[in-house]
Image: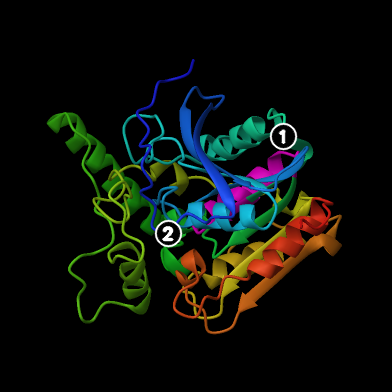
Amino acid sequence: MTTDLNLTQEWDKTFALSDKVSHEKVTFTTNYGFTLAADLYMPKNAAGKMPAIAVSGPFGAVKEQCSGLYAMTMAERGFITLAFDPSFTGESSGEPRRTASPDINTEDFLAAVDYLSQRGDVDADKIGIIGICGWGGIALNAAGQDPRIKATAAMTMYDMSRVNGNGYFDADDSEDARRNARLAWASARKADLESGTFAQAGGVVDPLPEDAPFFVKDYYDYYKTPRGYHARSGNSNDGWRTTGCQAFGNARFLYYINEIRSAVLVVHGEKAHSRYFGENAFEYMMNGKADGYDFVRKPNPVPENKELMIIPGASHTDLYDGGRDKVIPWDKLESFFRSNLHTVAQN
């Protein structure tokens, strides 16, 4: 069943529309019954069946922010692209708002692949995905599930199941710490039931304390300034529902990424607080074991098409929009997808 969405038709992105692409709003439905809102970008010289890329993230952001920038820029470079709002987020359907789920969010990516594969102008054998921040981990999970995904780029990735279960840098990786988190979630659910509303946990801290850690300042600089602020973005405003990420806390959803046979590019900033997520996930994907992963599995059967790229001097949010030094490796992304989706150069 498709839900009718009230989509904004005006251009309300955090970036200017390129004159090299065409753009339209589209919707598609997931197997959980949610209707997702998306922006479709196409090169103006598009002809015949073309390779396509679905894009989402960061976790708590909307398609009007950096996922749209990634989609538009890759369309400039010869791909049909789709930047979508996940379930419960932005212009997409789903209640209560600002909720996350390992399975539902993985399905969001698979449904985007469904949509692209059914378009007459897309080559269904040449579909890739890009996940940013928390959606980088979700992209890896989707790639491990669906062999239709021929190439995956995980940009400045978080493993949302690891951070919700173990805390940052695994500082809360203990039964006692997890019990305290579970008690807090249970208390929050009780309060929601008693109030009849869903409390919000708050977005990026505002005003910014002078003694805030660097990564908090990094987020503030993107989400709370004209650089990346958007009215529909949870991170820019009141954040997630207090219990919105509870499902991630008791899950470890990258278990099978050591079996991904398709191409994977993991990109992180040298100075990103989240760098360990990408490096550990890459090591586990390649070798079947890594720091932060209690399980040990077999090495990857196809290691030759996997790559880790560290951007010198870059912070976490520098890979959202390029930052001041414009560090997003667009040429690398183009060559990665062009090679692994087996495309020819566009004029």
Q: Is residue 120 above or below residue 276?
A: above
Amino acid at the residue labelled 2: Phe
Q: How is the image coloured?
A: rainbow
**Residue positioned most to the bottom:** 313
Image quadrant holding the C terminus, namely bottom right
* Quarter holding residue 112: top right
Mark 2 highlights which residue? 15
The residue shown at (54%, 55%) is: 19
Pointers 1 and 2 in contact (C-beta within 8 Å): no
Secondary structure, magenta segment, majority class:
helix
Question: Where does residue 244 sit, x and y in percent of width and height?
Answer: 35, 42
- Could you say which disc has been placed on residue 203 in the image? none
Q: Is residue 31 above or below residue 150?
A: above
Does residue 116 appear to the left or right of 323 in the view shown?
Answer: right
Question: Where does residue 250 sit, x and y in percent of width and height?
Answer: 47, 45
Magenta span? 130-149
Does residue 303 appear to the left or right of 214 in the view shown?
Answer: right
Question: Where does residue 45 sit, x and y in percent of width and height?
Answer: 69, 48
Mark 1 highlights which residue? 121
SS assignment at label 1: loop
Does residue 342 appear to the left or right of 237 in the view shown?
Answer: right
Q: Is residue 340 above or below residue 279?
A: above
Question: Where does residue 278 sit, x and y in percent of width and height?
Answer: 60, 66
Amino acid at the residue labelled 1: Asp
**Residue positioned most to the left:** 195
SS assignment at label 2: loop
The crowding category of the residue bearing disc 2, from other C-alpha atoms within 10 Å (few below 14, some 14 to 19, many at least 20), is some
Lower sequence index among marks 1 and 2: 2
**Residue positioned most to the top:** 1
Most foreground residue, 107 or 23: 23
Most foreground residue, 204 or 52: 52
